Amino acid sequence: MASSAHSDSASAEIPAEILAPAPWSTPADDSEHLRITAVRTFLTAPQGCPYVIVRVETNQPGLYGLGCASDPQRTLAIRSVVDDYYAPMLLGRDPSDIEDLHRLLFNSGYWRGGSIGQNALAGVDVALWDIKGKVAGLPLHQLLGGRAREAADAYTHVDGDNAGEIAEKVLAAHERGYRHVRVQVSVPGTDTYGTAPRDAAEARRRELRAGSWDSLAYLRHVPPVLREIRERVGTGVELLHDAHERLTPSQARELVHEVEDARLFFLEDALAPEDAAHFDQLRAAGSVPLAVGELYHDVMMYLPLLQRQVIDFARIRIPTLGGLTPTRKLVAAVELFGARTAPHGPGDVSPVGMAANLGLDLSSPAFGVQEAATFREATREVFPGTPVPERGRFHGTGLPGLGVDFDEAAARKYPVPEPLRHDRWALLRNGDGSVQRP
């Protein structure tokens, strides 16, 4: 499938009649006023996973905004929501009315919410913030209140088969400047999340999801390895671990108890969203800091956990939460309830999405740590200005808006996979054949 823009998603002219005007709008024939003239979507995969990029164009030559609407499992559905439903309502509108446009688009679907609609909305919303920053001549963090820190600490990822191998990789990352490192442990005989395949045969099994998951093997193997890694690396580096929602509530409680001595910076996704009511028991099982949220598609899903003070880090994913407009309000709530943010930033969040993360990271007192993907050279080619950590920290560029651009010609060189090709990684089963969370 070729990477392309949907040419029929919006015209390049202001319509004679605005479909969704605001009462304060200037007349449609007022050509001097800033207007949205087109909303275009692009599909590209320089990182290997599908990206959905939204570009909101205006009647001011050269002025446009970019947003990330990437969900690698539902790429075409998200694109359709932007092109067929949101774009027509945006034509002719003033892009500075972000709050009004966000609420208008959100409520335009009577059965609102859900990850598909929220990702589509985020693509538009972040693009509008990008435009606002460019008009003001200010980087995103300045629009959100200004700097709260010089730079944002990032964490990188390492994995391996045993404590000695992983500890060496942790110390090597620390030498490169990372103070935070996520460690994932390969469990023999089970399809383990976050670890590289040992050989081509295992890589093929994972591609086909021909293996299976064994929670009991994970619980026997991983905690002792994490404890030994801590002993080997000492206390000068923070260790993180992701359980990836594959445990039952009782198994999650056992894991929290068993990893106490590993002194983790946080344990991520010990519980799935549907098991969030068990976080109180998880908190009582030990003192390990808990992180959750990358799967949440509504900022309201965090509030009960923040109010009960049972999580320490909100793993926010701006695309899935509907953009910067709702996420900046969530970040304020995180601060008020004494928790911290740990924004989601793997390879399936584009550099545009990462730049949106950094706007919040640099401006919020609640920031904790930023996940850092290693973007390929191809990805940096498609997205000039891609954020790259220096010595384990992200610094703002000072450029207006997001500070990231999009090279349409370069993007065409990296077509996205056909639907259900990349998606196969999520089709995981347990040893007894039952379906497991990815």
Image (cartoon, rainbow, N blue to C red):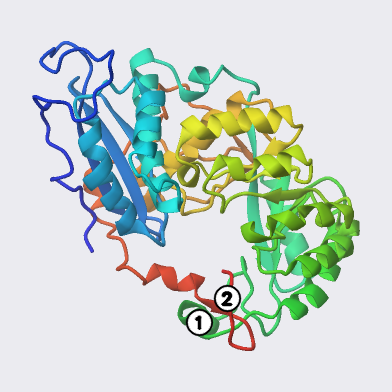
What amino acid is at disc 2? Answer: Pro
Q: Taking 380 as reference, is 251 left or right?
A: right
User: Tag 1, which secondary structure?
Assistant: helix
Q: Quadrant of the C terminus?
A: bottom right
Which image quadrant is residue 95 in?
Answer: top left
The residue to which callout 1 is attached is 200
Left or right of 17 on screen, residue 93 = right
- Residue 395 seen in the figure: no
- The answer to which of 22 and 224 lies nearer the viewer is 22
Question: Does 431 appear above or below 412?
Answer: below
Give residue 142's mark: none
Q: Amino acid at mark 1?
A: Ala
Percent coordinates x, y for residue 89 in the rendering = 24, 34
Q: Are marks 2 and 1 in contact (CB under 8 Å)?
A: yes
Rounded to the nearest angstrom, the CA distance separating label 2 from label 1 is: 7 Å
Q: Which mark is residue 197?
A: 2
Work out whether residue 217 or residue 93 is closer to the camera in this orientation and state it: 93
Residue located 56% across and 50% down the image: 296
Instruction: Residue 329: give x, y in percent of width and height.
Output: 57, 29
Please provide percent x and percent y for residue 13: 10, 28
